[in-house]
Image (tube, rainbow, N blue to C red):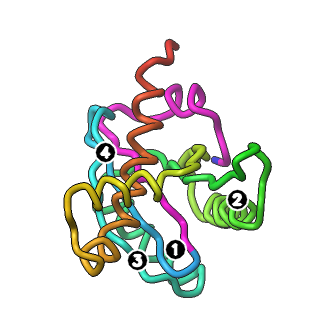
Amino acid sequence: MAQVDLPGLKATIVPGKRLLGFDLGEKTIGLALSDTMLTVATPLETLKRSKFSVDAVVIESLIHKHGVGGLVIGLPLNMDGTDGPSAQSARAFGRNFAARTELPIVFWDERLSTAAVTRTLLEADSSRKRRSEVVDKMAAAYILQGALDRLRMIAI
């Protein structure tokens, strides 16, 4: 399956399956996982980026291990809503991954997600080292939680 919108995701996801959220950076991929009721997003892990094929194998393993039924990829749009290089890269990642899976893929606007998470970590008085270790997977959880919140509001 290829890219769908949130109503399409809600219509196709198998009950009891989870969603996997992505925060795609240049050097890392933050990952977050929903619960099976699709209500809460939890940071999962941060992958150090490698070649796409290597990253995809690791992600496919996590999909199988955690019973994932759909993917939510953060889309870093420009502040005016247009695609920049990072958004184009996220869309390319989604297209490439869609060729490897039957799972529905949703792109979710992630503007300011990393900034919001960083601000929260600063308010919690996290050290710089600790922030760098967790910011990507927490940003993925922030992105996924936004999609989950919106998903609950969609009637089918």
Dot 2: element: helix
In the rendered image, which residue does mark 2 sit on?
Answer: 87
The residue type indicated by label 1 comes to: Ala
Which residue is painted at 27% across and 51% down in the image?
Answer: 42
In this picture, which residue range is highlighted in magenta?
Answer: 2-25
Pinpoint residue 57: horizontal percent, then vertical percent: 47, 76
Q: Nearer the viewer, mark 3 or mark 1?
A: 3
17 to the left or right of 69: left
Q: CA distance from mark 4 to mark 1?
A: 21 Å
Q: Earlier in the sequence, mark 1 or mark 2?
A: 1
Quarter location, residue 94: bottom right
| Residue 105 is inside the magenta segment | no
Which of the pair 137/70 is nearer the observer? 137
The residue type indicated by label 4 comes to: Ala
The residue type indicated by label 2 comes to: Ala
Q: Earlier in the sequence, mark 2 or mark 3?
A: 3
Q: Earlier in the sequence, mark 3 or mark 1?
A: 3
Q: Which mark is residue 47?
A: 3
Q: Nearer the viewer, mark 4 or mark 1?
A: 4
Q: Nearer the viewer, mark 1 or mark 2?
A: 2
In the rendered image, which residue does mark 1 sit on?
Answer: 56
The residue type indicated by label 3 comes to: Leu
In the rendered image, which residue does mark 4 sit on?
Answer: 41
Q: Nearer the viewer, mark 2 or mark 3?
A: 2
Dot 4: element: strand
